Image: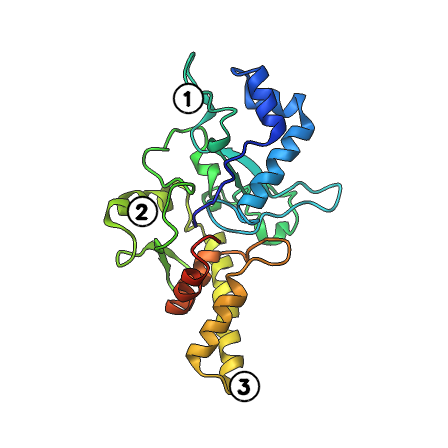
Amino acid sequence: MKKVHKSSKVPQKLHKFLKAYPRETWEHFRRRTRRGYKEVKAQIYSDQRGLCAYCEIAIKMAEREEDVDDFRVEHFHPKGETEAGGKNWHLCWENMLGVCHGGSQKDVPDSDWRFSSGKNDRSCDVPKGGRDISRIILNPLKIPFRTRLFRYAEHNGKMFVDERTCPQKLQRKAVSTINELNLNARRLRRMRMAVINVLEDEIGIRLSGGFELEECLDQLAEELLSPDEKGVFKSFFTVIRWYLGPAAERYLARSGYKL
């Protein structure tokens, strides 16, 4: 999980709908304003640089008619927690995140890689369901970016709270985030290992080409932690950041931590 730098400007059609129907539901917005729904998804995708807000897998848009996007709008505070006269979590822009289907949808693109038939292999908002766990997990909009919160096991891709770098006041929530969102699902660990293996191979190639280790790491930090020409990040940004260590932190500091 990395910090999401969310646009403060509410998408235009959502803003108009909320102004006209302040107590309406998200479902009605989706049905009545299909272009508005697409606008919301597009802005979320841009804000999150193409990554799931929870696990950091690349959000995948469907290209074939028979497929569905591996992307849906998640409400951090459950919509059902809206009370009469209280904040309408259904239509609150700051409450909306973009997430993958957590391995639960077999009709997404690359389903052989993304889908899992095992219920204990589901992640992100799937195990969350409609429960209000907002007080015990981290909100990607509110976590720091200047310091890395998580580390990973190099041999199996397992995710842990990094007690050396994660602020102590956030450590309990960070542990709960991993557990509640099942961010150590076998499917996600497999995907992280693929990223780690590529990094290992790339460093080996550059070392054999005569580069010094620090030079290799600096090059990879700039190449892999920068958005592409469409503004999209590589999958598992935080895994790459952890693996490249001080080189990643130097690059992020030069960027002003605004990535």
Q: Nearer the viewer, mark 1 or mark 3?
A: 3
Q: Nearer the viewer, mark 3 or mark 2?
A: 3
Q: CA distance from mark 3 to mark 2?
A: 40 Å
State which tag comes first along the sequence, 1 or 2.
1
The mark tally for this picture is 3
Determine whether label 1 and label 2 are within 8 Å by CB. Answer: no
Q: Which residue is mark 2?
A: 175
Q: Are marks 1 and 3 in contact (CB under 8 Å)?
A: no
Q: Residue furthest left?
A: 168
Disc marking residue 209: 3
Give the number of the disc on residue 81: 1
Work out whether residue 155 can be spotted. no
Secondary structure beneath disc 1? helix
What is the C-alpha distance between the residues marked 1 and 3? 57 Å
Q: Amino acid at mark 2?
A: Val
| Amino acid type, label 3 | Gly
Whole-percent x, y for residue 176 in the image: 32, 42
- Numbered label attached to residue 218: none
Quadrant in the picture for residue 162? bottom left
Q: At 46% from the left edge and 59% from the top edge, which residue is drawn?
A: 255
Say whether residue 107 is visible. Answer: yes
- Mark 3 and mark 2 lie on one chain; the one further toward the N terminus is 2
